Image (tube, rainbow, N blue to C red):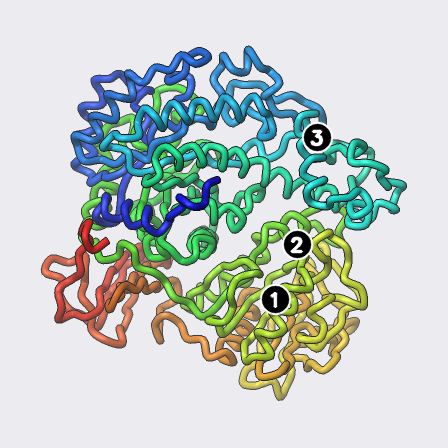
């Protein structure tokens, strides 16, 4: 990629100026409907306030129906219509699903599973990421698309591929094996270095040359964990190479058009932190389950992750469901008001564009029952009215565009640690990265404290509190940074099974948690995983401050020896009575805590609240009713407070007292208020400086 032309700030500003406010839109697949339908579509888009669409994501077979036989006639008409109606196209490179002619002529592009099964076409993303044939044909298509539409007035953004790593994250074919060996050669330089990193003297795996190495295909028992970890890294890099190959072409032909691809919230296979520097603006697809309790908290953690991966810049919510999805075993519809609430939640956490999958559903195909802005029943429906109402609300708050969020708490997340943590042959398969991260994120969310979800290499100097949830893989470099953070006056919370192995999945010797022992003032000799449903009583230690947390723990106990730390919470009960369950240690000018079990919700909330108090971390607002989320987006000399009521009660409203008067930006006349009444699923958007006019976003100011 030519970094000399990579100007993300300029391209972000151009996109903000083009949209003129918070964008609203959807995936638009007009090719699935008769052309006459597009006239109604454009009229309805105007009614709903649609300003941007994801276009032609799976249109490769229409645009290139045969090798090098490009036909842009249909999408020329679509793009012209969008431009005539002032709608921006996030135009796809159309490479997310190889067309039938390509897999017929070159079946070797099809991916292969670890069991040796060739995956057939008929779905989507049916390609080996390492296939030179696929990469070549994708590059040719992107060259043709970019050249053809480079000057089209509807073009505002390039959408490369689609949800990389979903469905096919890894390929185990011979082509991938050769590419994996090349990748290993670049990573280790010598086979001796690889043998050391992979601990290959175990089980007679020592290699004499790179040519002997295969992907971790299905084996009689556990494949080498270091090999598995490196194959996860390789798979991520192979997909990113596909993305960068297309991006380089786009930047050469259209240097001023921003480039993005849509990550899928919660997806394990693609490292967002690794990909982020290659993109102009980050995009996320988010599908929280309406039937799952506190699904909005998991979504919130994903939103904080994507925002922080992009350096705090605003991001795009490129897909969400207006109501139900089609791919769960039970596909729940969103209750009235939930679509609006969850859309505003993304805005509150930094999104500048809100989009849905999709605009209008097809009559056939696998996603015909996925909800959409215009349902099968037409526009005279609750779903369409809800999203049209949302469009009118978003248009009222142009001052939100480009604003940022500033938090004092960081939660560390690392895809490499996740890959290693969730491999086989561990003490317990119940320790999962996302679940353990949520165990620590949720109490902060409940306490009304804003959180940045950042990589361990992030600059920690502006944070007062850093949370480390089961960060199994931790380099000595990153551990040293945490130690210096605490010594300099920061507060640290580390949970069990952190700092166990290095970058090669080799155990840090001398006792767990390896390079964190000194800063935490403890040592762990043994892990005691618990069976499902088993709980342990916990009791606070007297002298550990007011109301020490009590309750129960589950999932795991660790045998902690105090090496300078003191117990804040102990295990109770006959066998483990008096053993440390949570510890606190003064290190330099700061404080470091360790949690050796999974406390229940109330006990965990108490421990996190203590850590916040020690760190001087305040909630966004001094007092928030339970279930109400508050977020502040800050601009140049002003800020906007967004309140969202996630409470599931229906019998009363919540009252929020504001420290200073604010303008109600969603109310006619923008009246000033210091007290906000929130019904369940209600939203309030409140601007600062009530005596001044609201800022506006124009091409000049953006």
Residue 283 image-quadrant placement:
top left
What residue do we see at 36% from left, 25% from top?
145
Q: Is residue 569 above or below residue 296?
A: below
Q: Position of residue 672 (x, y in %)?
A: 15, 69
Residue bearing the label numbered 1: 599
Residue labelled with disc 3: 177
Q: Nearer the viewer, mark 3 or mark 1?
A: 3
Which one is in front, 85 or 337?
85
| Front residue of 602 and 158 | 158
* Cα distance in 3D space between marks 2 and 3: 30 Å
Front-lying residue, 307 or 249: 249
Position in image of residue 637 (x %, y %) = 24, 69
Task: Estimate the spatial distance between the alpha carbons at disc 3 and disc 1, rounded to whole Å.
Answer: 44 Å
Left or right: 584 in relation to 257: right
Task: Give the residue displayed 68% in from the left and 42% down from the top.
Answer: 186
Q: Earlier in the sequence, mark 2 or mark 3?
A: 3
| Residue 595 sits above or below residue 357 on the image | below
Q: Which residue is mark 2?
A: 431
């Amino acid at each position: 990629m030519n970094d000399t032309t990579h100007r993300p700030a300029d391209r972000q500003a151009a996109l903000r100026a083009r949209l003129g406010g918070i964008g609203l839109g959807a995936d638009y697949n007009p090719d699935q409907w008769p052309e006459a339908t597009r006239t109604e579509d454009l009229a309805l888009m105007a009614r709903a306030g649609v300003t941007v669409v994801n276009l032609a994501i799976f249109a490769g077979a229409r645009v290139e129906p045969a090798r090098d036989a490009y036909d842009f006639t249909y999408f020329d008409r679509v793009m012209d219509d969008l431009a005539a109606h002032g709608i921006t196209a996030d135009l796809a490179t159309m490479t997310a699903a190889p067309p039938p002619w390509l897999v017929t002529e070159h079946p070797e592009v099809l991916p292969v599973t670890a069991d040796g099964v060739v995956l057939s076409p008929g779905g989507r993303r049916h390609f080996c990421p390492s296939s030179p044939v696929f990469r070549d044909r994708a590059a040719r298509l992107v060259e043709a698309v970019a050249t053809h539409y480079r000057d089209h007035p509807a073009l505002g953004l390039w959408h490369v591929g689609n949800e990389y790593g979903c469905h096919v994250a890894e390929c185990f074919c011979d082509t991938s094996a050769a590419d994996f060996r090349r990748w290993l050669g670049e990573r280790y330089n010598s086979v001796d270095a690889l043998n050391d990193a992979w601990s290959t003297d175990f089980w007679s795996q020592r290699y004499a040359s790179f040519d002997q190495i295969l992907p971790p295909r299905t084996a009689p028992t556990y494949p080498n964990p270091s090999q598995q970890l490196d194959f996860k890294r390789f798979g991520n890099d192979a997909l990113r190479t596909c993305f960068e190959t297309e991006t380089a072409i786009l930047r050469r032909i259209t240097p001023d058009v921003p480039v993005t691809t849509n990550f899928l919230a919660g997806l394990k296979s693609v490292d967002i932190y690794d990909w982020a520097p290659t993109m102009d603006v980050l995009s996320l697809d988010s599908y929280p389950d309406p039937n799952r309790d506190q699904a909005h908290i998991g979504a919130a953690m994903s939103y904080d992750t994507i925002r922080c991966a992009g350096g705090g810049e605003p991001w795009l919510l490129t897909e969400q469901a207006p109501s139900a999805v089609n791919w769960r075993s039970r596909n729940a519809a969103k209750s009235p008001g939930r679509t609006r609430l969850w859309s505003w939640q993304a805005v509150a956490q930094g999104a500048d564009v809100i989009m849905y999958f999709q605009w209008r559903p097809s009559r056939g195909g696998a996603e015909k029952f996925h909800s959409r802005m215009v349902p099968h029943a037409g526009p005279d429906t609750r779903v369409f009215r809800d999203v049209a109402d949302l469009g009118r609300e978003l248009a009222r708050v142009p001052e939100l565009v480009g604003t940022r969020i500033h938090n004092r708490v960081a939660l560390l997340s690392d895809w490499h640690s996740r890959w290693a943590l969730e491999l086989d042959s561990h003490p317990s398969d119940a320790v999962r990265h996302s679940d353990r991260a949520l165990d620590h994120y949720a109490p902060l969310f409940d306490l009304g404290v804003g959180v940045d979800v950042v990589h361990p290499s992030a600059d920690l100097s502006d944070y007062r509190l850093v949370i480390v949830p089961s960060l199994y893989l931790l380099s000595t470099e990153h551990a040293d940074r945490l130690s210096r953070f605490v010594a300099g006056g920061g507060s640290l919370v580390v949970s069990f099974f952190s700092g166990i192995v290095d970058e090669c999945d080799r155990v840090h010797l001398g006792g767990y948690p390896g390079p964190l022992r000194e800063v935490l003032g403890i040592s762990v000799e043994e892990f005691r995983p618990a069976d499902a449903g088993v709980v342990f009583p916990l009791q606070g230690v007297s002298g550990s401050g007011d109301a020490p947390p009590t309750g129960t723990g589950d999932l795991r106990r660790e045998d902690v020896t105090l090496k300078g730390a003191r117990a804040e919470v102990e295990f109770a009960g006959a066998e483990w009575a008096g053993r440390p369950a949570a510890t606190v240690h003064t290190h330099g000018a700061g404080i470091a805590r360790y949690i050796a079990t999974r406390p229940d919700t109330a006990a965990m909330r108490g421990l996190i609240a203590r850590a916040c108090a020690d760190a001087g971390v305040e909630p966004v607002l001094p007092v928030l009713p339970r279930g109400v989320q508050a977020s502040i987006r800050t601009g140049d000399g002003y800020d906007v407070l967004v309140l969202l009521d996630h409470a599931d009660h229906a019998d009363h409203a919540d009252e929020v007292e504001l420290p200073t008067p604010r303008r109600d930006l969603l109310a006619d006349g923008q009246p000033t208020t210091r007290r906000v009444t929130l019904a369940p699923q209600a939203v309030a958007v409140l601007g600062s400086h009530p005596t001044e006019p609201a800022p506006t976003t124009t091409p000049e100011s953006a």
